[in-house]
Each structure stands twice: as C-alpha cells, then as structure tokens.
C-alpha cells in the first residue's frame, strides 16, 4: 500500500525508495533497542557497584573481584554507547530526511496518472469573440512603438507595465492592491474571518534542496538555510507552527497578499511572456480546521467557490479540474485547479489552485487544536489561490482586447481603475534604445557599411 501509493502519487522516486525508508526505520528500531538494553545493564551495574560500596570499606572493595568485574563491564558498556549514540543520531537524521519525501494519502476519487488525466468538473462562460488577440510589439496599437516586451531582455520592462495612463485612479498603479480589493466582493471580508498575517518561513512540503529546485536560496555563506518564499502558504502555515487552536475558533480562515519568488527551472517551452515569471504578487487563502475529512473537505469547497466567484465576476471563460495523482505534489490530499482561457496562447492556462493537505503539514509544523477537555489533536490545513496577478492579467487583457487594440475593463474593476477602456498612453517618458530595435529602411544615398 505504501509503495504503490508513493509512486502513483508523486512519480518522484522509484519503487525501491520507500523500501529504503522502511529498512532505515527497522535499523533504527534495532539500534534503539540495543541502546535501551545497554542503558538498562549500565544502570544495573551501577546499582551493584553502589551496593558493594555500602557493605564494604574502600580497601576491601578494591580487592573484591566482583567489584573489578563490574567496573570493567561498566567501562565496556560506556565505550559501546559512545559508538552507538552518534550512529543513532545519524540514522535519525537519515530517516527523517527520507520520511519528509513521503507524500500524503490521496482522495479515492482523484484520477490516477499525469496531468492529461485531469477530470473537468465545471466549465464557466464562453470563449471571447471578436478580433484575434494582438500581442504587444512593434505593430501594436496599445503599447508604444518599439521592440516587443516579450523580445526585450528580461531586466528591461516597458513603461506601460510600470506607469498607468494618466487619469487612472491610484489603485491602478498597484496590482497587488487592486486584486486584493477585487477579492473582497467574493466574500473575503474581515467579518468572514480573513485577516492579514505576519511573515515567516517554514517548510510545508516544498523541497528547497530538490534538483532542480523551484526555490531561490539566499547566499548560504551568509544566511544558512534561508530561502525566498514561493507562496504565502509557507508564511501562513508558519504563523500557526508550534501552536494550538481552541476548538471553538475552528475553522480559521486567513488571506495574505505577498511577493512570491520561483525559479521556474523546467519551463523551457515558455521562456517569454507573463505566464511563467520569477517574481510576482499573489493573494493566498489559508485555513485550519479540526480533524476529519468532513471539515477540511468542506473548507476546500468553500475556497473553490470563492475562486469561481472571483473569476465569474471578472467575466472570464474558465474550467475547474480535479487534478490527478502526479500533479498533487507531496502535501495535497486533493487538489482543484482552475484554468482560464488565454487567447494569446490559444488554450487554457492555470490561474488558481486549491488543495486539502489534511494533517500532512500540521504534523510537520506541530499545528494542533485543543478540545474542551484539553486533549490536543493535529489539525487539518487547506490552501487556495485567490489571485495570481500575472496570469490573471494575461486572461483579462487578452480576453477583453478589441479590434483597435484597446482593452475593455470588466465592470467589477471599473471602480478601481476609473475607466471603462484601456488605451495607449498619450505620453511615455522613456524611449527604448537597447538592442533588438525595429529595422528602418535604408535611404538610397546611404552607403552600406562594410
């Protein structure tokens, strides 16, 4: 059961690796039993020596063969334990690191296989009609003239991506604020239990030392084991680490807007554009529930309904997927992804994700809840994306682009942007003079450079 589950769930390890964890655990148990036996014998030897010292004076004890034999056995036991203790520590660390790679269990209804086996649960809205999507570039009537933002070097960004057109309200200049505010009509008000959270960094089933890793590491020579968080989930979970929650306060719902960093090491198929970026803003929902699948499954459905409500209010065409075993990662018991239609890609693209991690994270982070009788039990954790800014921008801009290149603003966002339509800015303070410039026709009188 463990081996087949492990391999089907993650496809990260071979069948033999779970057997290695079992073998390591058995070796550790045998070693601990040996240590326990020696420690008991050591205690018995010490007690026998004390009895001899009580019944005889020092001169007699030193001549007693039994005393000398007990002292010799005590020294022998201490030498053995001095060898076994470091071995136990090493085996404990080895087993712990191996056990961290074991995944959570999976819901019986989860499809088995890779992402092609994802089950479509809902399809909402219609594909946008009208003119085909016009990518920004030299011929674009939305962006300024010059090389395409998707062709320019990564550190260089067009001014329209940084400065709003004149006349926009201030929130338009801050995507994180805009999208956090947009989440409020969908039920993420403070009276629903959502509240901001301080930052921290913990491990929630991510693997910083994986090869290749999606996590950025700070210079280890200066900051050992310090990483940039790829999602607010780790900070929200860290907020509860080594704490218990009163049963009457469950479930707890939290929301956090944060900057996220991801290496995206295996994305050679999409090296350009906004779909996969290394640095972005994301609004994350997180919940803690009591034990049992009923509560955590209910909260997962609640988060999913909030995601669908947000995307529906934005007028996007999207579908909800029940993700298969190989897409769950280590912590997820069940995972729902929402993919929005992106005309520029000609296909759906993931914009949100929601996962029920049951007690996988709480056992590692020591997150518990306390019943009225005082008994402590491990809680369940649930997480979900409220808004991943870059990907949502892709779907919004491409789905609402008009024939003249302008972009219609969905009614839900118009109060925040202060306009019904996004057009080309009337003034751009910067002019791109770097490489990849558009070719200008050569004049007849101009000599050809050798």
Image (cartoon, rainbow, N blue to C red):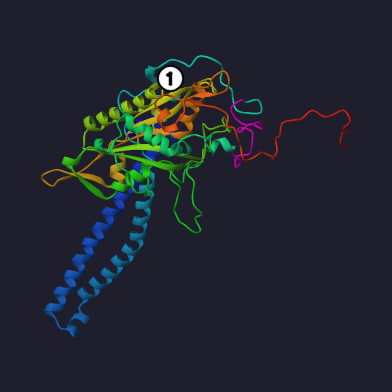
- Answer yes or no: is residue 206 visible: no
Q: Is residue 325 above or below residue 224?
A: above
Residue toward you, 225 or 97: 225
Query: Is residue 398 among the parts visible in the rendering?
Result: yes
- Which residues, given as a range, are shown in magenta? 141-157
Q: Is residue 147 magenta?
A: yes
**Residue placed most toward the observer, 38 or 248:** 248
Picture quarter with the C terminus: top right
Q: Quadrant of the N terminus?
A: top left
Direction front: furthest residue = 167
For the residue pair 207 and 197, the one nearer the viewer reads as 197
Residue annotated with mark 1:
317
| Residue 373 % position (x, y) | 10, 45
Does the magenta segment cover residue 181? no
Name the quadrant containing residue 300: top left
Magenta span dominant secondary structure? loop
């Amino acid at each position: 059961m463990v081996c087949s589950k492990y391999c089907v769930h993650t496809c990260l390890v071979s069948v033999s690796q779970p057997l290695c964890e079992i073998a390591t655990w058995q070796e550790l148990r045998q070693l601990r039993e040996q240590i326990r036996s020696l420690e008991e014998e050591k205690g018995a030897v010490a007690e026998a020596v004390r009895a001899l010292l009580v019944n005889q004076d020092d001169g007699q004890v030193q001549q007693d063969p039994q005393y000398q034999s007990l002292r010799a056995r005590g020294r022998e036991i201490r030498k053995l334990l001095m060898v076994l203790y470091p071995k136990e520590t090493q085996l404990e660390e080895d087993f712990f690191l191996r056990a961290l790679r074991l995944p959570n269990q999976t819901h019986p209804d989860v499809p088995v296989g890779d992402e092609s086996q994802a089950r479509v649960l809902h399809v909402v809205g219609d594909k946008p009609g009208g003119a085909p999507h016009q990518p920004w570039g030299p011929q674009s009537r939305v962006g300024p003239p010059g090389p395409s933002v998707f062709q320019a070097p990564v550190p260089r960004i067009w001014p329209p991506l940084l400065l709003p057109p004149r006349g926009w309200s201030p929130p338009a200049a801050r995507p994180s604020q805009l999208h956090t505010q947009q989440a409020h009509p969908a039920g993420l008000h403070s009276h629903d239990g959502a509240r901001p959270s301080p930052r921290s960094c913990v491990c929630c089933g991510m693997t910083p030392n994986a090869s290749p890793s999606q996590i950025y590491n700070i210079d280890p020579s200066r900051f050992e084991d310090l990483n940039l968080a790829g999602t607010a989930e780790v900070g929200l979970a860290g907020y509860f680490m080594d704490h218990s929650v009163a049963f009457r306060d469950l479930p707890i719902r939290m929301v956090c807007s944060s900057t996220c960093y991801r290496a995206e090491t295996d994305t050679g198929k999409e090296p350009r554009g906004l779909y996969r970026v290394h640095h972005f803003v994301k609004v994350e929902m997180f919940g803690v529930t009591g034990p049992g699948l009923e509560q955590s499954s209910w909260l997962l459905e609640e988060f999913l309904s909030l995601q669908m409500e947000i995307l529906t209010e934005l007028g996007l065409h999207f579908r909800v997927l029940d993700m298969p075993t190989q897409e769950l990662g280590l912590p997820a018991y069940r995972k729902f992804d929402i993919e929005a239609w992106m005309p520029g890609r000609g296909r759906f693209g993931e914009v949100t994700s929601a996962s029920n991690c049951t007690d996988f994270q709480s056992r590692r982070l020591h997150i518990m809840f306390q019943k009225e009788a005082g008994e402590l039990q491990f809680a369940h954790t649930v997480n979900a994306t409220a808004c991943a800014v870059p990907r949502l921008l892709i779907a919004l801009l491409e789905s609402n682009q008009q024939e003249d290149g302008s972009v219609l603003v969905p009614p839900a966002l118009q109060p925040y942007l202060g306009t019904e339509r996004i057009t080309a800015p009337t003034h751009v303070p910067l002019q791109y003079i770097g490489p990849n410039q558009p070719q200008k026709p050569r004049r007849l009188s101009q000599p050809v450079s050798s």
